[in-house]
Amino acid sequence: MQFENSREFARQLDKEDKLSKYRNEFILPKVNGKDVIYFVGNSLGLQPKTAQRYVDEIMKDWAELAVEGHFYAEKSWWDYHERFSEKLARVVGANPAEVTVMNTLTVNLHLLMVSFYRPSGKRYKIICEEKAFPSDQYMISSQVRFHGYDPKDAIVEIKKRDGENNFRTEDVLAKIEEVGEECALVLIGGVNYYTGQVFDMATITKAGHDAGAFVGWDLAHAAGNIELKLSEWNVDFAAWCSYKYMNSGPGNASGCFINKKYHNKKDIPRFEGWWGHNKERRFLMEPEFQPEPTADAWQISNAPILAMAPYLASLEMFDEVGMPALIEKRNKIVAYLEYVLHEIDKDVESSFEIITPADQDKRGTQLSVFLHGEGKELFRYLMDQGVITDWREPNVIRLAPAPFYCSFEDMYEFGQILKEGILNKQKV
Ligand SMILES: *Cc1c(COP(=O)(O)O)cnc(C)c1O
């Protein structure tokens, strides 16, 4: 499609956009009396208008039913988490039995390591990407030390080539082959949080299995953003937070995928609690743990219902729209943003560089832009103008126009504000 950098053109794209009506289903903060241009749905998604109602329902049930709400609330609490599995399975390409919601992301990764990082003998190394999200680095490093290994020896990082912005699949595969029978686990962020690069999860998962390792994915930046086929790719486990692209609210519960081949297994190590126990017998308080025959066996505590209510509200919207429609709009709006950036680049002296892959199949909603010669002042200027972006050292802004609530006109408007910001600075 031939794009134009004009307000009329952007408005025309909004008119043709089948998802444009969903913008009104979210609450956009205001700056200077105007809706913000929100580029940080990859960090904290906006609040769906239905979220409040879902929370109010729980408060009302608690007030009116108190403990009876566990069984007699319209959305009973004892099985509240089960309302997520089917819908979430459609988001991540899994069987409903393979998906569960519990705890928070880093906590879940630790818990999943109990099952899937079982170093023994020669096989004790973990392969991950260099400069992984800090929480993942701390998590992996502490796991390795917990098992008595030295992180410097037991953690093997995949590196980018000098001068390149993204990882190459061939380099990931070569590293897996090199570590070979020493490799216990491959654990990578499916979408890199810094650059927005999407890893070839199908190919890497297969390579990890060929080496005899378990393969897990941190999908914090992938869930609700890109097409996932966790079952088909035969991924062992995955976890994601829900407050980024999935709009569930700050610090909210995490989703987990556990491949069905590990269900109904007695010999798999796992930290257990009553919510993973056979649900028909959960309240009999029997001494011996009988795992649920699903990913729910990894549940430990009863669910934080108040927190999960807005997640359910948001998930219902995902189910209504479906990932294919979200991805179709995502590709178009990201392409338009990319075009606008290139147009602005022609008009200003200091140039910027998009470090996210240009290939649509290798990226999701996020474009990371390296601002040569520009500093944090520009980022602050954008914030003052109601453009909410995210700054990462050394000099990168991350722009993620979430397809649910960002408009094409936002992209045009952003381009104008950015250009003005750069030109004004060059004048002084
Ligand atoms: C956002 C993010 C996290 C956050 O972890 P929490 O446990 O939810 O605080 C972890 N890992 C990655 C890759 C992330 O992008």
Image (cartoon, grey):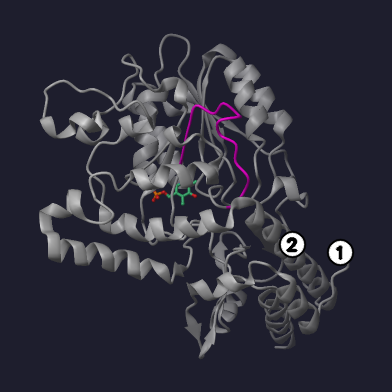
Q: Position of residue 204 (x, y in %)?
A: 64, 28
Labelled disc at residue 190: none
Q: Position of residue 71 (x, y in %)?
A: 19, 48
In depth, the one of 203 and 60 nearer the eye is: 60
Position of residue 57 in the picture relative to residue 140 (left or right): left
Within 8 Å of ligand 1, the CB of disc 1?
no
Residue shown at 37% from the left, 47% from the top: 83
Q: Quadrant of residue 310?
A: bottom left
Q: Is residue 183 above or below residue 199?
A: above
Position of residue 330 in the picture relative to residue 118 (left or right): right
Mark 2 highlights which residue? 332
- Please say whether residue 388 is visible from this viewpoint: no
Q: Quadrant of residue 170?
A: top right
Q: Secondary structure at mark 2?
A: helix
Q: Is residue 413 above or below residue 390?
A: below
Callout 2 touching callout 1 (CB < 8 Å)? yes
Q: Secondary structure at mark 1?
A: loop
Mark 1 highlights which residue? 1
In depth, the one of 111 and 57 nearer the eye is: 57
Extreme top residue here? Answer: 121
**Within 10 angstroms of label 1, few (less than 14), some, or many (20 or more) residues?**
few
Q: Is residue 414 magenta?
A: no
Q: Position of residue 294 (x, y in %)?
A: 37, 29
Q: Could you give the CA–CA distance between mark 2 and mark 1, rounded to whole angstroms? A: 9 Å
- Please say whether residue 211 is visible from this viewpoint: yes
Residue shown at 42% from the left, 39% from the top: 256
Looking at numbered disc 1 in the image, what kind of residue is underneath it? Met
Quarter of the figure with the N terminus: bottom right
Residue shown at 79% from the left, 83% from the top: 8
In magenta, the rendered stretch is 225-239
Main SS of residues in magenta:
loop
